[in-house]
């Protein structure tokens, strides 16, 4: 992937980062809770979900300034999910983005509360958006469904149920990750389109955003599974080999590394095809992002 694209991704992530720095100045929140929330939220990362929301919105005519509050909420939801996924009762991870996980630094109880705080504060941020109320409510509805029992929470439940079992089928694996990983990525794309005025249910732009998000979500998860086999802890910022150690169902386990890479590339190509109706810098960025996700595993 070109140096120019990586610079643009970093610049877009930096926009989100600067906004996030101002989001948790909560006068009434206990200091230790605010510290724990900030610790995980500001731990770094590429801010892919808010960047997707911004890019889809910008491609359809919205401004970065207007959409940043909503996009920041998406990153809070994603961060909450990581804090809870890392807990001993879930994935029991010690490192996240090269730093001790929240429960390792603050203890399990405060880590749980920090995740709860980030999830609920996310909706406060999203509702601050200056778009027409009906657009905001529809976009928030998409995100709430993606974050809940039909999305991330349900996918995590399926993941826990499947860990250590031999009977899972690849169709079940795809369904699980479409909920656990893909749902919030889809919602990030769709919410950007909806805030820009696309019909939330049947709008062409919403459907294109949904399909784009679904395919990059599939590619993203496959690549994560591949990197758990081939990556290194220093570059990934987290423990590798953890999936195999707990007998998790993964794409490499079902398909092998090469076929997994092929499936990730096919999903990336499907995502790119969803952009055929559009033009401009944000379209180019989204096209390159779909390929960048796959190139991480090469």
Image: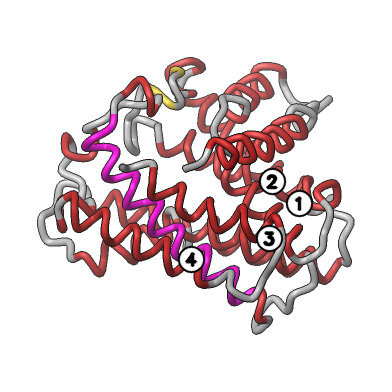
Disc on the earlier residue, 3 or 1: 3
Q: CA distance from mark 4 to mark 2?
A: 24 Å
Q: x, y (%) of residue 52?
A: 62, 53
Q: Secondary structure at mark 4?
A: helix
Disc on the earlier residue, 1 or 4: 1
Check the image and name the residue furthest to the left: 166
Choose mark 1 or mark 4, whichever is in front: 4
Q: CA distance from mark 1 to mark 4?
A: 26 Å
Disc on the earlier residue, 3 or 2: 3
* Residue beneath disc 4: 271
Assess whether residue 289 is covered by the magenta stretch: no
- The quadrant holding residue 90 is top left
Q: CA distance from mark 3 to mark 1?
A: 16 Å
Q: x, y (%) of residue 185?
A: 53, 56
Number of numbered discs on residues? 4
Q: Secondary structure at mark 3?
A: helix
Disc on the earlier residue, 4 or 2: 2
Q: Quadrant of the C terminus?
A: top left
Assess whether residue 220 is covered by the magenta stretch: yes
Q: Nearer the viewer, residue 137 or 218?
A: 218
Q: CA distance from mark 3 to mark 2?
A: 16 Å
Asked if residue 90 is positioned above or below residue 173 in the image, the reply reads above
Q: Nearer the viewer, residue 94 or 110?
A: 94
Q: CA distance from mark 4 to mark 3?
A: 13 Å
Residue 126 numbered mark, or none: 1
* Residue beneath disc 2: 73
* Residue beneath disc 3: 56
Q: Residues within 10 Å of mark 4 (few under 14, many from 20)?
A: many
Choose mark 3 or mark 2, whichever is in front: 3
């Amino acid at each position: 992937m070109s140096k120019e694209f990586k610079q643009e991704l970093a610049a877009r992530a930096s926009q989100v980062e600067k906004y996030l720095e101002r989001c948790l100045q909560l006068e009434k929140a206990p200091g230790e809770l605010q510290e724990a929330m900030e610790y995980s939220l500001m731990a770094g990362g590429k801010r892919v979900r808010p960047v997707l929301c911004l890019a889809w919105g910008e491609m359809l005519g919205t401004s970065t300034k207007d959409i940043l509050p909503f996009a920041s909420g998406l990153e809070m939801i994603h961060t909450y999910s990581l804090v809870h996924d890392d807990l001993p009762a879930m994935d029991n991870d010690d490192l996240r983005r090269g730093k001790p996980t929240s429960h390792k630094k603050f203890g399990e109880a405060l880590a749980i509360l920090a995740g709860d705080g980030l999830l609920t504060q996310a909706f406060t941020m999203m509702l601050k958006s200056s778009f027409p109320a009906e657009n905001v409510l529809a976009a928030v509805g998409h995100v709430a469904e993606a974050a809940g029992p039909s999305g991330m929470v349900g996918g995590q439940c399926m993941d826990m149920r499947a860990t250590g079992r031999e009977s899972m089928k690849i169709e079940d694996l795809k369904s699980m990750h479409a909920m656990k990983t893909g749902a919030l990525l889809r919602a990030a794309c769709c919410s950007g389109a909806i805030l820009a005025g696309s019909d939330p249910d049947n709008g062409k732009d919403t459907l294109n955003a949904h399909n784009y998000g679904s395919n990059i979500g599939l590619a993203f998860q496959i690549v994560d599974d591949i990197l758990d086999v081939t990556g290194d802890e220093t570059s990934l910022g987290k423990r590798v080999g953890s999936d195999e150690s707990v007998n998790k169902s993964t794409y490499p386990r079902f398909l092998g590394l090469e076929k997994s890479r092929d499936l990730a590339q096919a999903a990336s190509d499907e995502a790119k095809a969803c952009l055929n109706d559009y033009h401009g810098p944000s379209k180019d960025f989204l096209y390159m992002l779909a390929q960048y996700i796959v190139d991480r595993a090469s």
